[in-house]
Image: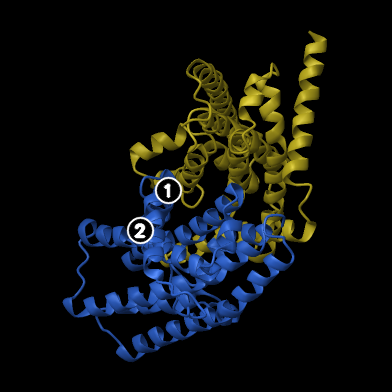
Chain colours: A yellow, B blue
Amino acid sequence: MKKNFLGNIRLYLASAWYSYRALYAWQSFGPYISVKIAFPLAQMLLFIFMGRLAGMADPLYIVIGNILLLPSTNGVMGVSMTINGERDFRTLPYLIASPAPRAPLFLGRSLVHIIDGLLSTLMALILGVVFFHVDLTRSNLPLTVLCILLLSVTSCGMGLILGSLSLRTREAWTITSMVVMLFYILSGVNFPVAVLPQSLQLISYSLPLTRGIQAARLAMNGANWSTINSLFMGELLTGLIYIGIGYLMFMWFEKLSLVDGQIETV
Amino acid sequence: MSRSSGKARHNPLPFIGKQISIQIQMRALSVFSFGLLIFQPAVFSTVGYMLARMAGKPAPDLIYVIIGGGIMGMWSSMVFTSFFDINNDRRHGTLELIVGSPTSLTTVLAVRTFANILTGMVSMLLSFVVVIFLFKFTIPLRNHPYIIVSLLVLFFGFWSIGVFLAHFRVASRVTGQFINYLELPVAILAAFMFPFEYLPRWITWLSNSIPLRWGVTGLNASFQQKLVLSNLWQDWATSIGVSFIYLFVTYFLSKKVHDMIRVTGELSSV
């Protein structure tokens, strides 16, 4: 059992290393960082201007929301892209045919995306402080960091669900992009969830991220553990449920694809 | 035997027709197109709607939030579909055939971009449908011709910038990736979804060098009850003028790109 466990850890780290070498190692520092600055800044600015048009005087709600969305989008897209990328490069059937355990194989590949997401968040936080006067002096920094880490992990469940669609359809990446866009509306990034109609609020609270973003906002305002623990634990539980569903979906679709031989046909 | 003229006569119309037809067929049943043309603009417009709701307004600013969403859809569609077209050509090995064929690269890119913007118009038309039928927005009859002209001017602006950017995608796959990141910055600089006046003064010189900024301002102006025709004419003329500058630069750029990829043989390697 110990050997098995160490084997899984080795596979997890090896997958992460190969993923890093394939997707990031060839990039040069300058262009990589400029993209890290340009994208979050542009996203924040667009919504800030839209908020101003609507009559919002203070853009901080939007700025912080968009910063907190970054680790989540990287978590969702990273895991989904990991599985979808294998399909794109025609290597998915080889992986499916291999006896390697699926969890360390694919979660290891997504590790670099999660680290990349955390780096994006750090860059966005710096931008927020410099350009939009985000005040971190009052914040509960360790708890904020913990919430950001939690968001990057809980979002992986949604990524796993969407990524496992790659076993059945070639449109999984498009569907992933659409779901990530829905977070702009449903997860309280640009406006509080309470603004949404009742039915959408229900959907919002059944998704990962919503509680995590609320907890992170409170921690950034200086809240302590007792204030955010129900949101934090709720986010953790929702994330674990999604990870479980994602894993089961992957196994089910894998089995289905092996039976009908349709891994890459549709 | 008759003497043949130096250059074979070439009728471009069948090529143009076929290329447009292929592009539209490729988009028609694609989930990707649905995402770009309908879903994404709808999400942006919904965010605008919810922001207005939070601020206590009964309805959002329809021109910026809904029509602006349509323009956003057109732009995103052009940026991404043009990118994926070239990307797919690289992947399937057809880019070499296109570059090597007697039809110039610029012609192929120009027709493809035209078709991609044409499909992008779906997004714009849907935004009109939403504004008119869902929000009961009435556009005075007098404004109709101005709106149509504004749309044509905007279309031309999209086309000129699209052809310009497409050459970078052919030149290098790395540059092509970067163009993807232009989606939001250009949407901000051209003020698709908010008034242009919101932009800080120091950045307006950059905005002014984008034809879409003038096209969008013209389109927004043509919806107003009180039309200021002199401003409208100025927006149209500037948009067309800036578009021609892009086309002029593209003319020289195309030769450079064509020579570069043939001489260095780096078409698929970089």
- Gap between marks 1 and 2, in whole Å? 11 Å
The numbered mark, 1 or 2, whose residue comes first in the sequence reads 1
Amino acid type at circle 2 is Ser
Percent across and percent down for residue B4 are: 48, 78
Is A10 or A65 nearer to us in this picture?
Answer: A10
Secondary structure under the numbered disc 1 in the rendered image: helix
The residue tagged with tag 2: helix, strand or loop?
A: helix
Q: Do the residues at discs 1 and 2 belong to one chain?
A: yes
Q: Is residue B144 left or right of residue B177?
A: left
Most foreground residue, B112 or B70: B112
The residue sitting at 53% across, 16% down in the picture is A255
Q: Residues within 10 Å of mark 2 (few under 14, many from 20)?
A: many
Q: Amino acid at mark 1?
A: Gly
Residue positioned most to the top: A1
Left or right: A207 with respect to A229? Answer: left
Q: Which quadrant of the figure contains the N terminus of chain B?
A: bottom left
Q: Chain of mark 1?
A: B
The residue drawn where x is 46% and y is 51% is A191
Q: Which mark is residue B123?
A: 2
Q: Is residue B223 left or right of residue B88?
A: left
Picture coordinates of residue B20, whole percent (x, y): 39, 60
Image height check: is A17 above or below B2?
Answer: above
Please report, as a chain letter, where disc 2 is located: B
Q: Please name the residue shown 40% across and 87% down the image.
A: B237
Residue that label 1 marks: B35
